Image (spheres, rainbow, N blue to C red):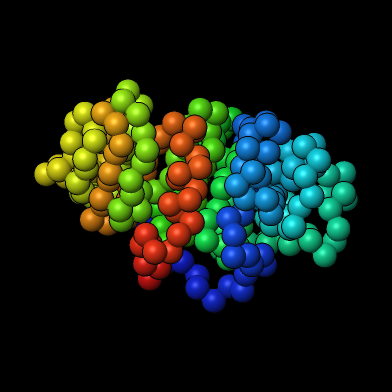
Amino acid sequence: MIKPIVHDIAPIVHTLHPITLVGGGQATPEDLHTSLNFAPLCVAADGGAALALRAGVELAAVIGDFDSIPADILAQVPRARQHHIAEQDSTDFEKALLRIDAPLILGVGFCGARVDHQLAAFHTLVKFAHQPCVLLAEDELIFLAPPDMTLPSIRGDTISLFPMATVSGRSTGLEWPIDGLEFKPGHQSGTSNRANGTVRIEMDGPGMLMIVPRRLIQPVVEHLSRQAHGRWPVRE
């Protein structure tokens, strides 16, 4: 069961532009700088600070329970930017998402390395469906499908849809359309679909992960950053 989201936590970081959030998973300085091209302000979730400092990136804040950040790394961050959250009912990714107020979050270092951490990150995308967030993997982008999205994909691009809840929708431009299908974990998924060109996806509710080529990062960021395209409501 997904626990209710706490709504009365004041943000630590507020920005009107996309923000980069770096975690302690598998990622390179090049991955981080790719994200910073679109979201220059950088926040670390706990041990993600190590990658940021190694890449020469200034951190606006470090948020977490500090159980995975070495003392010598933490010492390089000004104390006023250290935000220790002691509770153990949430992951560091969740702790950070709860305390960032931004139109879009780009997550680096939340894929690869430990599978359980990666699965927890996917779960968090669904739990915080109201907060657009894109995870950068080695070759792919992972994000929760918004109510309506058009991608400038090209023929042959892999467009995977993976349900984290029961959900349905419609598509144009996919080799195997999703119209009339009920997606549900353990029953129907939509991985390894292919684009015939530009793809449009419409979803009836939150719960569908989209996995698309990483080279589509610019149109994905531009689309998800705009409030006008519709957002999922905050889950009570």
Residue sitting at x 68%, y 50%: 40
Instruction: State whether residue 137 is above or below residue 74.
Output: above
- The answer to whether residue 124 is visible is no
Q: Position of residue 189 (x, y in %)?
A: 25, 35
Q: Position of residue 149 (x, y in %)?
A: 33, 49
Quarter of the image where the C terminus is located: bottom left
- The answer to whether residue 6 is visible is yes
**Is 234 in front, or is 40?**
40
Q: Position of residue 6 (x, y in %)?
A: 50, 70
**Is 100 in front, or is 92?**
100
Residue 64 in the figure: left or right of residue 222: right
Quarter of the image where the N terminus is located: bottom left
Residue sitting at x 46%, y 36%: 216
Residue 160 occupies quadrant? top left
Residue sitting at x 87%, y 44%: 72
Residue 15 in the figure: left or right of residue 215: right
Q: Residue furthest top?
A: 156
